[in-house]
Structure formats: structure tokens, C-alpha cells
């Protein structure tokens, strides 16, 4: 009899304990992890601090604008995954999440205004509108006949086809190195006109600029998606700081504030971009005597 009572008591205790655990999971939003360990590598990661630079030590500097095409194989990881999966998001989703949840700043990407990318702050609604969100009017059939309804149209992250990068190249004589610092990023959206039914004539628009140093802490905690492993060991900040992307130069700082496309065309555009790249490389090489 005592043994039976002991069994019933243990059984009741386990039932209550299981119910408490289930209630705790439901009440606190605790989710079950697929991993046998706690993933803390990127959760608490911080961006590597920049080297201190004095103005007196900068012998030479040049601002460069680049374009990263997501259609290039080396840049595919910036657009993956198309929807958040396994704790990873595409670069544009990370940026939009930072604007929405952390209050990070987006700036108006005004055309023909290179050098003043960070002077007009955009609201979150403005950002969504530039991303293509809005409302459309459709004609639907009802019991009373035909009627028009207003349908909200969300933005599509897959519309982002490229990124513009603004960066500063400079020579620091204190460390005797040619260094580079990314200043800002600008997603470029690909879209079509409503009357372009065959989508034969794509159009491109700059969505907004972000100040890269402001987003660095977020990028350092945001792992990239890898099709080869679920281990999150490299972040978006690592990608940009280690230059793991393919790009080409579209503009350098000049008194006319004009891009290469404004004074060259065809093959000459690529040759001019290569000339600017070689100029930066040769500057550093010419400082040394062998």
C-alpha cells in the first residue's frame, strides 16, 4: 500500500512539473533549439575597432563609389536567404530590421548629389514606399456588380538587385599603410513600369543611404547564410571589412560631382574604372623603393 502511494505521489509530481514546464514555455515564448549547444558566437559579437588615425598622419585620401551587383556569383550571399531562415537574413532584411526595431537611420538617396548622402533623414514609411510598398486599386466582381477595392501592396526584398558603396581610401604615414573605411551603403531597387507587361525594360532607383559605422554593431551580430553549413561563423561586417565581395568603381571624388557614366560610355567606362583602381594601387607602390 505504501509502495502504491509512493508511486502515485511521484507520478503526480512529474505531471505537475511537466505542466509547469509547458506553461513556462508557452508563457515566456521559449522555443526549442535544434542545436545541442547555445549559439552565442554572433549573438554577443562586436565589430573590431578601427585603428586610430590622426588627421596630421593622413598624407593622401580619395573617396570612391562602387557598385555591387547581386547577380554576380560572388555576391549571391548578400541576397540570401530570400526569406529569413535558420536565424539568418539577407542584407536588405537586416538593414530594414535595424531601421524598424533599433531605430537606425536611413537617409534620402537624392540623385546628382554625391557627397551629401547623409543630410535628409527618411521615416520608416518613406523607406517602405521607396522599397515599392503602397496600395493599388483593383476592380472586383461583387453581388451588386463590379466594384473597386484598395489593396495594400507590401514591398519585396527580392527587388534589390545591387548596392552602392561609398568608401574612403587614405594613406596613414604613422602606420605606413594604405587603408580603406566604408562610409555608407545604398540598396538599388530594380522595377518595371506598369505598362511594361513583358518586363523588357528594367529601371533602377536608389532606395536610401545608411551610415555604415552606425550599422556595424548590427552587421557584426548578423551571420550570413551559408548553403554548406549551419554554423554561423561569419557576419556581414566580416564580409565588408575583409572585402569578400565583387564590385566595380562608378565614381571618384571630383569637383564636378559626376559619375563615370556622365563623361564616358561603352568600353571606356570600364577602362576609366580600371584607371582609377590602378591609380590607387600605384600610389602606394610609388611610396616604396626596392
Image (spheres, rainbow, N blue to C red):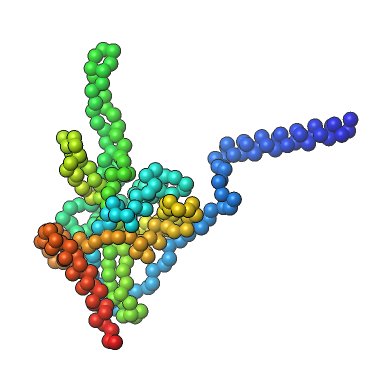
Question: Visible in this render: residue 43?
Answer: no
Q: Nearer the viewer, residue 193 or 43?
A: 193
How many marks the image carries: the answer is: 0
The quarter of the picture where the N terminus appears is top right
Q: Nearer the viewer, residue 47 or 56?
A: 47
At horizontal 46% and vertical 48% (from top left) the residue drawn is: 87
Q: Quadrant of residue 4?
A: top right
Question: Visible in this render: residue 37?
Answer: yes
At horizontal 35% and vertical 62% (from top left) the residue drawn is: 244
Where residue 238 appears, x then y in whole percent?
40, 61
Residue 193 is left or right of residue 94, and the answer is left
At horizontal 34% and vertical 50% (from top left) the residue drawn is: 79
Whether 77 is drawn above or below 272: the answer is above
Residue 31 is left or right of residue 66, and the answer is right
Where residue 226 appears, x then y in whole percent?
43, 53
At horizontal 14% and vertical 66% (from top left) the residue drawn is: 255
Residue furthest to the bottom in view is: 290
Q: Quadrant of residue 32?
A: top right
Residue furthest to the top in view is: 144
Where residue 24 appears, x then y in whole percent?
61, 39
Whether 183 is drawn above or below 108: the answer is below
The quarter of the picture where the C terminus appears is bottom left
Amino acid at each position: 500500500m505504501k509502495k502504491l502511494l509512493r508511486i502515485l505521489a511521484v507520478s503526480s509530481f512529474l505531471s505537475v512539473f511537466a505542466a509547469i514546464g509547458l506553461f513556462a514555455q508557452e508563457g515566456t515564448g521559449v522555443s526549442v533549439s535544434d542545436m545541442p549547444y547555445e549559439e552565442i558566437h554572433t549573438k554577443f559579437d562586436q565589430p573590431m575597432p578601427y585603428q586610430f588615425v590622426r588627421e596630421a598622419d593622413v598624407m593622401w585620401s580619395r573617396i570612391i563609389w562602387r557598385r555591387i551587383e547581386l547577380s554576380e556569383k560572388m555576391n549571391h550571399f548578400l541576397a540570401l536567404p530570400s526569406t529569413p531562415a535558420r536565424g539568418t537574413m539577407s542584407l536588405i532584411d537586416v538593414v530594414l530590421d535595424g531601421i524598424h526595431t533599433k531605430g537606425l537611420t536611413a537617409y534620402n538617396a537624392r540623385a546628382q548629389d554625391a557627397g551629401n548622402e547623409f543630410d535628409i533623414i527618411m521615416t520608416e514609411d518613406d523607406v517602405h514606399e521607396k522599397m515599392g510598398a503602397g496600395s493599388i486599386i483593383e476592380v472586383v466582381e461583387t453581388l451588386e456588380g463590379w466594384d473597386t477595392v484598395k489593396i495594400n501592396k507590401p514591398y519585396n526584398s527580392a527587388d534589390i538587385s545591387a548596392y552602392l558603396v561609398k568608401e574612403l581610401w587614405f594613406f596613414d604615414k604613422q602606420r605606413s599603410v594604405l587603408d580603406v573605411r566604408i562610409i555608407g551603403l545604398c540598396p538599388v531597387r530594380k522595377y518595371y513600369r506598369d505598362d511594361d507587361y513583358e518586363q523588357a525594360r528594367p529601371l533602377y532607383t536608389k532606395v536610401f543611404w545608411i551610415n555604415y559605422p552606425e550599422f556595424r554593431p548590427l552587421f557584426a551580430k548578423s551571420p550570413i547564410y551559408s548553403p554548406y553549413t549551419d554554423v554561423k561563423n561569419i557576419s556581414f561586417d566580416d564580409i565588408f571589412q575583409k572585402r569578400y565581395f565583387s564590385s566595380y568603381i562608378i565614381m571618384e571624388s571630383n569637383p564636378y560631382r559626376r559619375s563615370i557614366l556622365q563623361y564616358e560610355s561603352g568600353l571606356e567606362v570600364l577602362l576609366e574604372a580600371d584607371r582609377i583602381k590602378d591609380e590607387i594601387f600605384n600610389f602606394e607602390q610609388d611610396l616604396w623603393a626596392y
